[in-house]
Image (cartoon, rainbow, N blue to C red):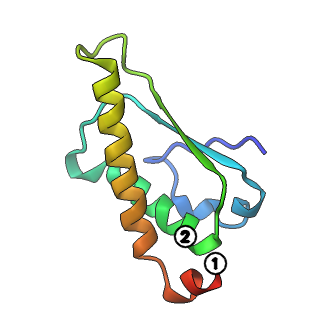
Amino acid sequence: MNLLIRFGRSDAGVLREVVPLVGGFHLKFWDLDDADERVSGPLRDLGRLLAETGFRGTLTSEWGGHEWLNGDANAITRQHLDLAAAALVAGAGSGSSSAREDR
């Protein structure tokens, strides 16, 4: 299933019914500015949803800001992966205990 959700414009909860049909999520990022948790907040919500629904698929990350941001692309991508992993794990840990027991 191909599915596009732009966080900031959508809520992770709208995916609840289709997550069982989804094999992977593509996390695209442009920069690492996490002011007001604009990056980590939606990822935390996604992590919670994935934990609650027992998601076992893949997550990929793509950096789209290489044309205008200066810096080491490997380092910036690693920072995004670290930020995303921390937010996803935090979200997964905040899900309901019954959902975690079902996995």
Disc on the earlier residue, 2 or 1: 2
Give the number of callouts: 2
Which residue lies at the image location 56% right of the left edge and 89% below the top edge? 98
| Callout 1 crowding tier (Cα within 10 Å): few <14, some 14–19, many ≥20 | few
Q: Which mark is residue 51?
A: 2
Assign the N terminus to one quadrant of the image: top right
Residue 46 in sight here:
yes
Residue 50 x/y as whole percent: 57, 64
Assign the C terminus to one quadrant of the image: bottom right
Q: CA distance from mark 2 to mark 1?
A: 8 Å
- Residue 38 or residue 81, whichever sits in front: 81
Q: Is residue 51 left or right of residue 23?
A: left
| Residue 45 position (above or below residue 4) | below
Which residue lies at the image location 48% right of the left edge and 62% below the top edge? 47
- Residue 13 or residue 74, whichever sits in front: 74
Q: Is residue 67 left or right of residue 36?
A: right
Q: Quadrant of residue 79?
A: top left
Disc number lying in front (2 or 1):
1
Which residue lies at the image location 40% right of the left edge and 63% below the top edge? 89
Q: Are marks 2 and 1 in contact (CB under 8 Å)?
A: yes
Q: Give the amino acid type for the residue marked by disc 2 in the picture.
A: Ala
Q: Give the amino acid type for the residue marked by disc 1 in the picture.
A: Arg
Task: Provide the secondary structure element on which disc 1 rests.
Answer: loop
Q: Quadrant of residue 34?
A: top left
Residue 61 x/y as whole percent: 49, 36
Q: Is residue 60 left or right of residue 69?
A: right
Task: Provide the secondary structure element on which disc 2 rests.
Answer: helix
Residue 39 in sight here:
no
| Residue 72 position (above or below residue 48) | above
Q: Is residue 9 left or right of residue 103?
A: left
Residue that label 1 marks: 103
Residue 82 x/y as whole percent: 33, 45
